[in-house]
Image (cartoon, grey):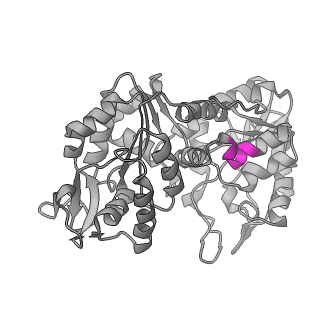
Amino acid sequence: MTEHIHLPLLQEADLKDKIVLVRVDHNVVKNGIIHDPYRIDATIGTLYHINAKGGKIILMTHVGRPKDKKNNKINISDDTSVKPIVDYLQSKLHINIKVPDFYKDENRGYLGIETSINHLIKELKTTKLDCIYLPNTRWFHGEESKDEDSDRFARQLAGLADIFVNDAFGSWQSHTSTVGVNRYLPSYAGFLMQKEISNLDRIYNPKSPFVAVVAGSKFDTKIDSLYTLIEKADNLVLGGVIYNAYLSAKYGISIKGVAEEEVETALKFVEYAKQFPDKLIELPYIIESDTMEGKIDNQYRVIDIRYLQKGQQLNYVLDISARSFEEDSVKQVFSDARTIFVNAVMGYSPNFYEGTIALDELIDTNSSAVKLYGGGDTMQELKRLLPGLYIVALDSPNYYIFTGGGAVLKAIQEGSVKGLAPVKALLYNSN
């Protein structure tokens, strides 16, 4: 059955002459460059609505991972700056945006919002300025804190505005800017958040047969969602290092680069999956490479997993061969599907990509199925490798590209969109 939740919606808010603090997921900058503005463009409807209804906008997003997990030092640099995002928005919307600057602690980043921002807010109110974009939220010491520093930062953010809007579906982690601010301001779900949640229902209540394709660089980060999907989906297809760990566990082989703990995690999943015979579709042809330095002639080969021997040692397995998707059994699974969920790049980018191309082209041959793509790398590789299909997918009612693949997997794992902390925070605020 469809899950009914009653989020406070942006269209219900009185925005006239209000300062509106909007949390977006504009995490599209890598090394100071935007490779795909899709996640920015997806929020423009929310921003236009706020502006049209007389609201004044302050934007905030996280960018990358500026905190060093080993020493907790926050590194403020151009690589994780919002400046490329601001430049993009200014050129696209022809508006004037300013980014405030604050005192930088050598180790802890920005310690908080300073009163120096007040003159920008005054310019915003008097329309001398069209928008304020706060620095990367992860540059602030209080963003990922779990103590009074988090609450202090939440109060400071709330002090900037009259209303809070969360339009950052992809930012599902329990950080101050996603779950803290709503405690102190009237809070609403933006249009993108609403759209993503609506499309999640097509995964929660899929038309059957439902096929899920999941790949990734680490088994343990996807494992909980895999347990849910092997139960829920009619078929599950694995790729990437996740598949390598699975093959290592099931066939008793070793693959270079696959950690022992990954194999141990995969072993438990292999045992669990035995309850669901024939659900997990094994892609038979994989590509073994002697090096990770590139796809070099005479240094890679196709391996048929049906001839693997226990104890066999493989070099790096960096892709799924396109031949896997020419197998009648594999083609049948995808042609029969009525719902296909894809959170997968099959090969090691940028040189090993034939598996990803073959997968996406095979999926596209099923014209009637609902095709739901997770965000992040899945989206970027679709655009890079099959730009024509990417453009079609953006406008096709049979396709939907989520802005946050990790958020979708978390929602699948939790079994409810209420399991996403930012959604739960909005629901709590509305009761």
For this rendering, which residue is in front, 160 or 263? 263
Whether residue 335 is situated above or below residue 63 in the rendered picture: above
SS assignment for the magenta stretch, majority = helix
Q: Give the x, y percent position of residue 82.
A: 61, 51
Indicate the quadrant where residue 14 lies.
top right
Q: Give the x, y percent position of residue 266.
A: 42, 63
For this rendering, which residue is in front, 326 or 27? 326
* Viewport quadrant of the N terminus: top right
Q: Is residue 33 left or right of residue 111?
A: left
Among all residues in the image, which is located at the extreme left?
298
Q: Give the x, y percent position of residue 16.
A: 85, 26
Task: Please indicate, yes or no, whether residue 119 appears anywhere in the rendered image.
Answer: no
Task: Please indicate, yes or no, whether residue 131 appears anywhere in the rendered image.
Answer: yes
Q: Give the x, y percent position of residue 397.
A: 47, 22
Among all residues in the image, which is located at the extreme bottom?
71
- Tag count: 0
* Viewport quadrant of the C terminus: top right
For this rendering, which residue is in front, 104 or 222? 222
Start and end of the magenta stretch? 418-424
For this rendering, which residue is in front, 140 or 306? 306
Whether residue 307 is situated above or below residue 40 in the rendered picture: below
